Image (tube, rainbow, N blue to C red):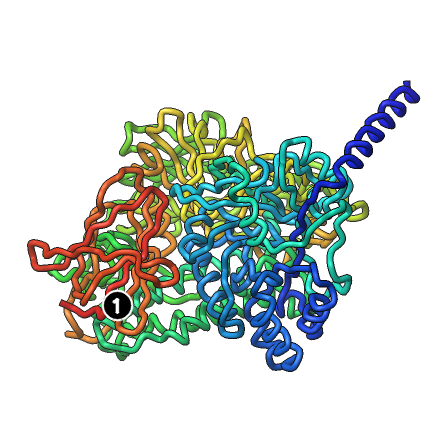
Amino acid sequence: MKKRKTYRIMLVLQALLLSVAGLQAQTTWFADGYHGGVYGHYPMWQARFMVDKLTEIADWKINLEIEPETWDTVSVKDAENFKALQEYYSTTGRFGRIEFVNPTWAQPYCYNVSGESNIRQFKYGMAKIREYFPEATFTTYSVEEPCFTSSLPQILKGFGYKYAVLRNPNTCWGGYTSGFGKDLVNWIGPDGTSIPAVPRYACEKLSETDTWSTASNSNSNEFIAACFADGVKYPVGMTFQDAGWRGGPWGSQYKPTVYTTWTEYIDMIQDKVEPMDWAFSLEDIKPGLVWGAQVLQRLSQEVRVSENRLVMAEKMASLDYLYTGRVWPAADFREAWRTLMLAQHHDCWIVPYNGRPGDTWADNVTRWTNSSNAIADEKIAKLFWGVESKDAKNIRVYNTMGTTRTDRVMIVLPENIKKTNLSVFNQDGKIVPSQQSIDTDGSTVLYFEATVPGLGYSTYTLKEKTSQANKSAAKELKDGTLLVETGFYIAKISPAKGGTITSLVDKKHGNRQLVEVGKELNNLRGYFYKQERFHEGSESPAKVSFVEDGSVFTRIKVENQIAGNSYYQLITFNKQNPRIDFELHIDWDGQPGIGAYDQTNDYKAEERAKAFYNDNYKLHLQFPFKDLGDRLLKNAPFDVCESELDNTLYSSWDSIKHNVILNWVDAENVSKDYGVALFTDHTTSYLQTSDLPLGLTVQYVGRALWGRNYRIHGPTHIRYTLLPHANDWEQAQVEAASYAWNEPLFGDFVKSGSNPLQRSLLEYADANLHVSSVTMDGADMLVRFYSTSSEAKEHEIQWNCNAESVEQVDLNGKKIATVKSDKGSNGEMVTKMTLPQFGFQTIKLTQVKLK
């Protein structure tokens, strides 16, 4: 039997070789080039090396994916050789020998950061490259790592790109794209924007001998034979070498092969093939990072904080320009984005431990985001006039969203007014719900409910007056269960079940029970492989206590342990908002091993199965919702994707699934009339299995990529939120709720009588329209809107300002069309726009002034 099988294999190989031999007259193509940069890898001899090799080898061409900031360093440290590269590009290279294919500042993965961050990566990166290569063009987007997200067609087209490449054949450690189609596809984004792209062919298999490449990385004879057999007419391979490799042209096994730039290749074939339409989904990106590793968790939190704070600071500084005439701090914001963009570098996420102790990628993320935060905080602080403690009674609260909102705001109280009889009054003299609390740093804080108009502020006043009576929302039942009842929910928290929520009834929607019978919400579960068993928080009795119970919120503290590690959860039931907010804090005892199995001594990079892939064994939070999970939706940069996965579990490199939560995941029922959204404070992975509608990855400890030991580095602390809602995610305005959670109302004290008590820059009615960013360019204001509304309707925007002209512009700032403006009933400027679902549009108001 064994001989017969061997004979058959020999016949197949012989037939394959004969077929390849018959193909040798057919030409194929190969896209070679270099990847790297001063923060990753770029030796100072690289510029001269490229010029010398291009001069020596007449038919070689290269595609460059070099971090733009690299040229700042190289132009100084390797000035003579860099000048030679500049001259070569200007006289020869730009005419078909060299192409810049990825100008993003730090080559981010794209799917794991905000849509606004992706835009800035391109904007600042392209500008930097043009500082040194003024003739540089950006026509085709191509990358070495899986730096993709579903909304890229819209972003690329906005910057003037014509083409893209949807593959990363030689660096698939962190993931890859689905195989689809043949020579070309029309990559269609969620908003309907289409861009011609070279896909990872349907016949382009993953390597069978390693876990980092696909079949096109060297144009092997077998790959080319498979291409022609599948009907690929113009097969092209690809490898972007690491800057610093000295081998010159990357060898193509198949002959004849022609080296090409990507634009040259696509220009050549686009009229010769019929591209297939591909509605490329978020789930066609297969990212396999070490989700749950504490180092990744922390840097992701740091990036999220900076993203939110910087966008808020830009919006508030734009208002400051209008209201006070302060010059827009363009240079400062550029520097803040520079350090934030570096923190989004793909190497931060895939090799966070690389570098010397104290100077790893993860260490640098902390430094970079701290720098961005300092700039953002300084710009925000300028909006508030300095006050002495004795004068602290007027509070200005800013709203950076485009619609009027009522939400909780927090103010740190000065020492001399920490009184229990303080009340908060709005500008109409009416008292609003408020309560005092002690923050984690020991400071006294005041929480109150503020209502603020779109992209503007309202003013509130502190007075010494007894607050309105507050009815307690929590009580202890005879069996020790804690009962919490607000206007939104009736919840039962069981100390006997580890402080989990055993019942959660939605009072606003027919007293609907949200917890599966016999299950527990917010339960911790994970496999501790040193103990060879699963542990759950619900196994141990917990201490459950009231922390606060006021007119703004009720807060419960759950103290427990899992596998000998102490943890607590804070559960906050808001009185005026349907969100339920959670904080989880774990104090670890040593280095517990958490994951599917121990790979301490047997980790092999080339083996497909790895412990860190399997989320089911990682420590995770469980949300066994009753009758939910038939539909699952997740947001992404300028996108919301309905999942087509039966479950999110996988355990090997060749079966990666897209299980990433950016800001939120929403579990809905099949009739689309109810759901619960889960928000997180960082990009990580979520779970969906046949038994569990939704779970959130918390911790993995063990070997992972390149055999690195992903360890515990202190306490774990994360924030997450649940938002039950009627209808589907769109009607429930889940994306707007996510914006509100990430861009909270911001307030501080101001001088008495300073400026009008309330102002608003703009206002619109549809909460599914979002203000992505507001920036200034001299006296011109740029406002970017993003829509999650599926209705094909006009959005009417009321502006409390005037402008000489209003234009729609692309991402390069080039005019697309004039936007007609009318006068509203109160004399305000009114504009209208129509956006497809998941589309964004940038509006430029020239010479903007207050009314």
At 73% across and 52% down in the image, what residue appears? 706
Q: Look at the picture and state if 809 lies above or below 557.
A: below
In the rendered view, does 514 fall on the left or right side of 84?
left
Q: Which residue is mark 1?
A: 319
Query: What is the x, y in percent for residue 766?
Result: 24, 45
Regarding residue 307, the answer to whether it shows in the image is yes
Residue drawn at 68 percent across, 40 percent down: 653
120 or 549: which is nearer to us? 120
Which is nearer the eye, 287 or 671?
287
Residue sticking out furthest to the right? 3
Find the residue positioned furthest to the front.
25
Q: Tell me if I can see residue 77 in this picture.
A: no
Q: Residue visible at 46% across and 25% down? A: 517
| Residue found at x 32% / y 49% | 553
82 lies above or below 364: below
Q: Position of residue 591 (x, y in %)?
A: 69, 53
Image position, residue 790 (x, y; %): 31, 38
Tell me the element at label 1.
helix
The foreground one among 260 and 516 is: 260
Q: Amino acid at mark 1?
A: Leu
Q: Is residue 293 left or right of residue 784?
A: right
Residue 728 horizontal/vertical position (percent): 34, 33
Report the front residue among 224 and 425: 224
10 Å neighbourhood of mark 1: few (<14), some, or many (≥20)? many
